[in-house]
Amino acid sequence: KAGVTQTPRYLIKTRGQQVTLSCSPISGHRSVSWYQQTPGQGLQFLFEYFSETQRNKGNFPGRFSGRQFSNSRSEMNVSTLELGDSALYLCASSLDTGGSGNTIYFGEGSWLTVV
Amino acid sequence: AQRVTQPEKLLSVFKGAPVELKCNYSYSGSPELFWYVQYSRQRLQLLLRHISRESIKGFTADLNKGETSFHLKKPFAQEEDSAMYYCALSLNLGDMRFGAGTRLTVKP
């Protein structure tokens, strides 16, 4: 079974631009969540989608948004990029059997550098 | 507040020595705790979860609700165990709180 796939793996953007990152979850997984990883803040939860609906959201500004398609694939978008948005963005998927305790499986991440 | 603390950023042991990576959590409900590992140039992957009470690659972790801890242990460390280890608390709906991580180095 293929794992979580993220594209692109590496990208460089200029301040003020926007970026879209893509994630294909493990086949059969309907829950997709996104995390930001930085040396200073560690792994931080961005948001989670299930059946094309955002069910949960972390403490990030509105410049960070996402969506999920009917095939469970997901995209996240960051608008008006700032230098501090430079990070590894991780997508994770899970079966979501309800409640907490669902094991999430991570992709390799998209490395975003804002210059 | 829901929080996971890994007090050691770096941990170094010799091959064959016991290793313990500490994890403490703060959560008012019944916690669902995980250990994730990231080997060099690999993705973050699940090592074990407390609910399954299993041993993976010789590692075990016991949930101690009294001490709010979920320490990861292995009796005899191997060089291939060198990696970054993250303790995580599952809240709900994809929201997992991760500790800052502990980089384990096993020296030959």
Image: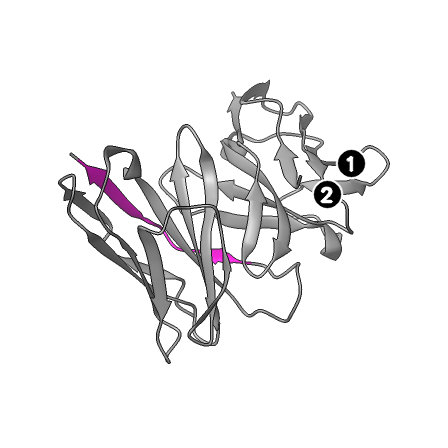
Q: Residue at x 46, y 35 (%)?
A: A42
| Extreme residue in the front direction | A62
Q: Residue at x 39, y 62 (%)?
A: A4
Relative vertical location of residue A56 with respect to residue B89 in this rendering, above or below? below
Tell me whether circle 2 and circle 1 mark residues in contact (CB < 8 Å).
yes
Q: Residue at x 64, y 25 (%)?
A: B16
Q: Which residue is mark 1?
A: B68
Relative vertical location of residue B71 with respect to residue A103 in this rendering, above or below? above
Mark 2 and mark 1 on one chain: yes
Q: Is A101 part of what is drawn in magenta?
A: no
**Disc number at residue B27?**
2
The answer to whether residue B39 is left or right of residue A12 is right
**Disc number at residue A98?**
none
Residue B36, given in percent of the width and then of the height, sits at 55, 44
Q: Chain of mark 1?
A: B
Q: Chain of mark 2?
A: B
Which image quadrant is residue A96 in?
bottom right
Which is more foreground, mark 2 or mark 1? 2
Which image quadrant is residue B4 in?
top right
Which image quadrant is residue A7 in?
bottom left
Q: Earlier in the sequence, mark 2 or mark 1?
A: 2
